[in-house]
Structures are given as C-alpha cells and as structure tokens.
Image (spheres, coloured by chain):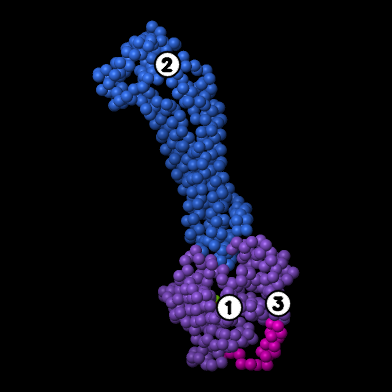
Chain colours: A purple, B blue
Amino acid sequence: MIRFENVTKVYDQKARPALDSINLEIDRGEFAFLVGASGSGKSTFLRLVLKEDRASSGAVYVAGQNVANISSWRVPRLRRGIGVVFQDFRLLPQKTVFANVAFAMQVIGKSRSVIRDTVPEVLKTVGLEGKENRLPHELSGGEQQRVAIARAVVNRPGILLADEPTGNLDPTTSMGIMGVLDKINQNGTTVVMATHDDDIVNEMRKRVVELRNGVIIRDEAKALYTSMIPVVGASRRLRDASGREPEPAAATRSEARAEARAAGEAQL
Amino acid sequence: MRLQFVLAEIASGLRRNLSMVVSVILVTFVSLTFVGAAGMLQLQINQMKGYWYDKVQVAIFLCSDGSTAAGCATGPATPEQQENLGKLLESPAVAQYVNDFQFESKDDAYKHFKEQFSNSPIVDSVTPDQLPASFRINMKDPEKYQIISETFSSQAGVETVIDQRQLLERLFSVMNAASLVAVSVAGVMIVCAILLIATTIRLSAFSRRRETGIMRLVGASKMVIQLPFILEGVIAAVIGAGLASATLWAVAHFFLGGYLSQQYPDTAFISAGQTLILAPALIGLGVLLAGVSSLLTLRRYLKV
Ligand SMILES: Nc1ncnc2c1ncn2[C@@H]1O[C@H](COP(=O)(O)OP(=O)(O)OP(=O)(O)O)[C@@H](O)[C@H]1O
Ligand SMILES: [Mg+2]
C-alpha cells in the first residue's frame, strides 16, 4: 500500500537529510507505528506519502502508484484516498461536530443526502453519537480527536496517517483513541501512526518502525516501543534512558490501559 | 452541492473581509470611471464628426432660402448654377486636385442632420428647406484647400466654401488630450486596484488558512479551494464596474443631455443610451483585473 524505495529527503543542503535512503513497505490492512526521537523524520515520512513534499531522490509508491508521476491536478485524488489526523485536531471552531465531518464530504462534492446518511454512521463508529451538534470547544480533547478521526475516514480512504494523535491526551483517553484506530484498521484501512507514546506502542503490539536521524534502525512485527534486541552501541544508552523494564507500577498502569482500550472499543 | 458550497464560502469571505471588499469596489469604480470617461470622449468625437468628416475635407455650400452671403443676392441656387459648379469640379483645372466629390441634396442634408442630432431637441425644429445643398469634396491633398476656396467662393450660387476639418480638429485635439489624461489616471488607478485586490485576497486566504488546509488534506480540488477567493475579487470588481457604468450613464443623461445640450444646441451630443455600450467593456475589464491579480496572488499564497 505504501512503499519507499531508497527515499532521501533533504530540506536544507547544509543539514543532514531528514530521511536518508529509506526502504520500507507497508502492506494493505497493516497497522504500523513510526517511532523515534524528535526530528528523526517521522512527520517527513508522512508528508512524502501525502505528496506535501517531494522526495529529493528515490521513489514513493502509494497504492501502487509512484507519487512523483501524479500531476498536480491529480494530487487531490491521491489525498482523497488518504485520511490524516494530527496532534492538534485541526477542527473548524465555528462548525459543529456534524459540520466538521460533513465539510470533508462537501468539498469533494458529495451530495447532501449522502452526507446526511454517512456522517452519523461515522460519528457512531468513533463513539460520538448524540454529540453531533456540539461545537469543538464544548468537547474534551479525546472527543475532539474522535471528530478529527471521523473527518479523516468519512470518505473511506484506504490509508489513515496519524501524526502523534495522542500527543495532547492523557493515557486513558489515548487508549480510547487507539481503540478507535484499531477498529478502523480492522475494517481494512491501512494505518500508519507516528508517535512518542511508549505505553501505547507497548500495549498495541503492532509493527514498529524506528527512525533515528532519518535512518530506519529497526523494523519489527508485534514489537515494543524500544527494541528487545540491542541494535547499535549508541542505542543502548538511549534505551536505558527511556527504558522500561517491567516494574510493578508500570504493570498496574498497563492493566488500567487495557481496560480503557477495551472500553474504547466497546463504544464502537 | 459543490456549487452551493462555493457560494456559501464566497458569502462568508465577503462578510469577513467587508472593509477590504468595499475598498476594492471603490478603487475599481474610480479607475473604471476614468477608463469609461476616455471612452465617452471618443464616442463624443465620433458623434461630432457626423456623416461627412472622415469622407471629405471641403464642403461647398450652395445658396438656400435664408442665405445672406454676397454671392446669394439672387436667391437660392438654381439647377443651372448647380450644374455649372458640377462641371467646374470636373474640369481639368480643378479635377487634378480632387479625388472624388459628391452632391448632397437638401433631403440628404436633412437625413444626415437628423442622424447626427438625434439626441438634440433641435432636430424637431429644422426642415429640409432650411438646410443648404452642398458639394462634398475629397481632396487628393487636403492642404490644397485654398485653391478650391478661391475658385468657388466667387461662383454664382455658392454661399460659402469651408474646410470642415479645420473647424473641428482643434476641438478634437483637446478632447483627445483629455482622453489621454483620463487613460493615464486610469492606468495608475488600475495598478492600485490590482495591488489592492491582491492584498485583499491574501488577507482572505490568510484568515481562512485553517479551512483551506483541511480542504487540501481531504482532497478538495484546486478549483473548489481557489474559486471562492477568485470570485470574491471578481464580484467586488464587477460591482465597481457597474457603479462606473452607472456614473457614466448619469453624466451623459444629466450633464450632456440635460445641461450641455441646452447650452450648445448646435452641437451633437452622445445619448445616455450610447454610454451603455461601454458597460460590457468596463465589466470585462474589471473581471480581467480581478481574475489576473487573484490568480497571481493565489499561486503564491494558496498552494495546492
Ligand atoms: N519544512 C522544513 N524545512 C526544513 N527542515 C525541516 C522541515 N521539516 C522538517 N525539517 C527537518 O527535518 C528533520 C525531520 O523533521 P520531522 O518533522 O520529520 O521530525 P519528526 O520525527 O516528526 O519530529 P517530531 O517527533 O518532533 O514531530 C528535522 O531535523 C527538521 O528540522
Ligand atoms: Mg513530527
């Protein structure tokens, strides 16, 4: 579904590349975490998938198509096949929940009756039934993020990109959001999520792609936030700094998370 | 749905940017009024040229009922006198200077007069008898007017020989200079209008960057994203052009038609209706201004 072939992205000739010879394939229906320190190139990766930026070299394939060959007037069609969620929700403050989600359908010319049918359905999927007429400032952060997710998937994209979607949320709320994303993934949507949230990654046990300084240093299935296998000497220090050897407190916390996630999915 | 969406976006954009929109309307209004004033002067020049101006240079008027000139002591020109004048014009001595000439009878004169003064009240009080018949001469060399004048002024039945170009050309050069001034002022104002439209659209794009950002992400087409901004500018410019057209109409109707034509009854003025042919040109120009400046602005500030 998403394939990077030897992709390098250089923003600034003087600095190191933001992405350096990345080779990666994410299959249809997969759920992958992109992890790595700040500045490691996670957002850059997502921007290249969206053709928000062009790769300096190498090829980015989305749904089998090299995005470099998509002419600018066809880029909108590429983006209709990709939903995006951000840390800061990016809702329109004057519009209600319903209108925010409907907006994504209006601007691509969906008819009013289709919108009337689809939006409530999607709002139900993300667990926002009965909150259609609220304004964003009348919602909690987690609820706002659910609106953003609803907007991202309302046009049934094959891919959902999430850039630190839980960055502004507390752990329990985050797990609720993860439940929503998991559900969307189980419906067949490929999900790629950039995150710093170690607890979530550890909880979900999905594929983890770890970037450092624009290079993939780890790509593991059903993995943890930090590697079980020591990779390079320098990474050991890093791991130790944020390391999470199971300790009693963490164990109970993780149990609480599991409950919250189950609750999040139960709402679906 | 998409159309409705675009219309709603335009309405909200116009509302949010009301003061800028009003200034765009005023600037296009003033600049297009100057453009239109230049156009109106040209229309007026054409009106004053009348039927013969571009075709001939010299007119030999024959004596008519009311003529008081010395050569007309014997009353209106007789058919023989008219025939003799025709022969004289064809004689080799004169013909070498003449390209071509035409005889304008009293009835022809009346017809042409009615056309030229169709907007004046004077047209109702004139009859064919009052208008002199004439020979209209297209010169090989307009500078040789003197020769014709000397040859014909003393002929029996000739009231007067005039070089009609000389009469009007001074006036026309003043009017042409005035059009040029109007066009120059309009040029400066149009630059203002373009810059102001660009600024307005930039502000508008900035104040709606949240919406447009989301539209981009969910895959709205370039047209759906940009059209509201372009149309905002175009609508403001069209309103300005409409005001300019209305102003020109009012000037023609109240000033030319109502005042000047009373003061100068023997001058042919354009009618208010004639200024309306300028309106489509002004509106077209307004649309072009707004369209071009918004396209240039959006290319820079609203990447898709
Ligand atoms: N538009 C840009 N212009 C220049 N440099 C940029 C640009 N965007 C990102 N970079 C640089 O590219 C590198 C990777 O940035 P990126 O945003 O992809 O990191 P990230 O992994 O998403 O970090 P974070 O976790 O903090 O969001 C950084 O060094 C950053 O400074
Ligand atoms: Mg980032």
Give the chain letter at badge 2.
B
On the picture, is B261 further left or further right than B135? right
Q: Are marks 2 and 1 in contact (CB under 8 Å)?
A: no
Per the model, the C-alpha gap separating discs 2 and 1 is 94 Å
Q: Amino acid at mark 3?
A: Leu
Q: Identify the residue position indicated by label 2 in the image.
A: B132
Image position, residue B269 (x, y; %) = 49, 28
Query: Residue sitting at 53 percent across and 22 percent down?
Result: B121
Other residues around mark 2 within 10 Å, as few (<14) / some (14–19) / many (≥20): many
- Please tell me whether mark 1 sits on a helix, a strand or a loop: strand
Q: Identify the residue position indicated by label 1 in the image.
A: A190
On the picture, is A213 further left or further right than A135? left
On the picture, is A55 further left or further right than B136? right
Q: Residue furthest right?
A: A130
Q: Identify the residue position indicated by label 3 in the image.
A: A268
Image position, residue B187 (x, y; %) = 45, 44
State the residue in front, B121 or A77: A77
Q: Is residue B40 visible?
A: yes
Query: Residue sitting at 57 percent across and 68 percent down?
Result: A80
